[in-house]
Amino acid sequence: MGRYQLPARRGRTRLPPDAWLIQALELLYEDDPKPAYVEHNILISPAMLSAQYRPKSPPLCTGGIGPEPIRSTRTAARVEGLQAACRLGSRAGDAHAPAILVAVKRTMPHLLVMQYDADNSFFVDDPGEVAGGMRGYALPGEARWSRSDRPIVAVDFSPRPLASLRPHRSETGGGAKVCL
């Protein structure tokens, strides 16, 4: 895969925000630590970081990843890729890893707010029915509703954001450190 993907993208000025490729490059690097995997990993990361809403954005948007509408699944999928980029960059000693980690940490509060809890599901007939599930959209006006006027908590809204919240350990020269 790496032998095809990397040369096929060489010379592009803008790479697609391919979180899954970053995760694959991290795994390939474990088996065959080629510098090209790290370099391409770091080249893809800005495509995801450029779409991240910064701290001066509206509070519900801050840390989310666009384009609009900001969706929990898209944000979480990109964060999983950024986590892999951070781990691989840390493992390889790349100077970009700390900046990527800052962006990942900026996203975590956004995803936590997207989870249904007692404070934000008061309008639902049965708040317990959606407790722990993830909203699909950051802003209320963007919410999708079923025909029965119940919020949709789709399968893809929950596992990916929750998986992106778990910390990962990254081995570095001086021992282990947490790299979300």
Image (spheres, rainbow, N blue to C red):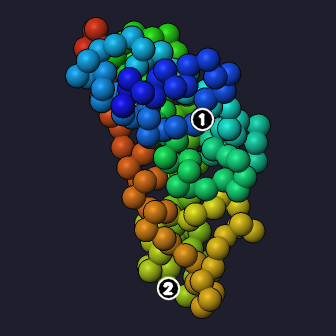
Q: Quadrant of residue 55?
A: top right
Residue at the far left in the pictured view: 31
Residue flagged by tag 2: what amino acid is it?
Asp
Q: Which residue is mark 1?
A: 16
**90 left or right of 56?**
left
- The image position of residue 66, as x and y in percent, is 67, 46
Residue flagged by tag 1: what amino acid is it?
Pro
Which mark, by number, is residue 126? 2
Mark 2: which secondary structure? loop
Residue at horizontal 52 percent and vertical 41 percent from the top: 78
Mark 1: which secondary structure? loop
Is residue 63 placed above or below 172 in the rendered structure? below
Residue at the far bottom in the pictured view: 148
**7 left or right of 24?**
right
Q: Indicate the quadrant containing the N terminus: top left, top right, bottom left or bottom right.
A: top left
Residue at horizontal 64 percent and vertical 22 percent from the top: 12
Residue at horizontal 47 percent and vertical 15 percent from the top: 39
